[in-house]
Amino acid sequence: MKKEYTDDELIRRVWDVEEIKKLVNKRVYYLANEWRQKELDELWVSGDEYKKTASFGRNTGYYVGMDEIKKYYVDHHLSIRKAQLKDIAAKNSDIEESDENLHIGCLVNHPVSTGLVEVAGDGKTAKGLWYSIAQETSAKPDGTAEALWMPGKLAFDFVKEEDGWKIWHIVDATDLVSEAGEDYSKQEIYHNYETNP
């Protein structure tokens, strides 16, 4: 039997969808600014019952629990950025290895579109699906850059905590990785980073 909602409940559900969309849009800006730790602190679940089961899935791995997500999403990414800066600074004496230069020559944009959100009947959880025409660019020590197109799907589960909607699960499913300006038909579908499952 189809659940009937009061006008007030319907308004609440519409508002919840808008709040969830705003949360995902905010994540886009955090990612563009390389605020990964801030994202985990502010946009992800904080309740103990959800932190243990929070998850982040990528084409190259699946991480469960906020500690494991942080190790991959923040710490591992930071180690990559530090290694990039070290290589750049070694070739360019004008650039020093400092926190201010950590993301020098990097441009990360994962905008989202075509959002589809469904709030559960009880209004406590929700799920959503977006598409992203993403790009990531990283400077190389020789002054050039690696510029990649990375379109893909983003699937989310959300939980409504006391202070609002929070991200509980993400699957970031990259459809392909293509070097900008190159003949796509001659490229591998995925660049082989560390593993390529």
Image: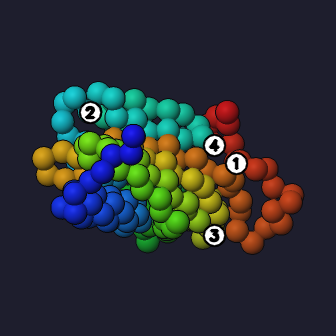
CB within 8 Å, label 1 to label 4: yes
Residue toward you, 84 or 160? 160
Disc ID at residue 9:
none
Disc 3 to disc 1, how far (Cα)?
18 Å
Residue 2 image position (x, y, % from top left): 39, 45
Question: Which amino acid type is shown beneath numbered disc 1?
Answer: His
Question: Which amino acid type is shown beneath numbered disc 4?
Answer: Tyr
Disc 3 to disc 2, how far (Cα)?
40 Å
Quarter where residue 1 is shown: top left
Residue 145 image position (x, y, % from top left): 62, 67
Quickly name the residue at label 2: 51
Identify the residue at image location x=14%, y=51%. 163
Query: Callout 3: helix, strand or loop?
Result: loop
State which tag comes first along the sequence, 3 or 4. 3
Residue 140 seen by the camera: no
Among all residues in the image, which is located at the extreme left? 162
Q: In the figure, is residue 162 to the left or right of 178? A: left
Query: Callout 4: helix, strand or loop?
Result: loop
Disc 4 to disc 2, how far (Cα)?
28 Å
Residue 14 image position (x, y, % from top left): 30, 63
Disc ID at residue 193:
4
Residue 41 seen by the camera: yes
Identify the residue at image location x=66%, y=52%. 175
Disc ID at residue 144:
3
Question: Which amino acid type is shown beneath numbered disc 2?
Answer: Lys
Identify the residue at image location x=18%, y=61%. 8
State which tag comes first along the sequence, 1 or 2. 2
Q: Please say which color scheme the image uses.
A: rainbow
Residue toward you, 105 or 1? 1
Quickly name the residue at label 1: 191
Quarter where residue 121 is shown: top left
3 vs 4, front mark:
4
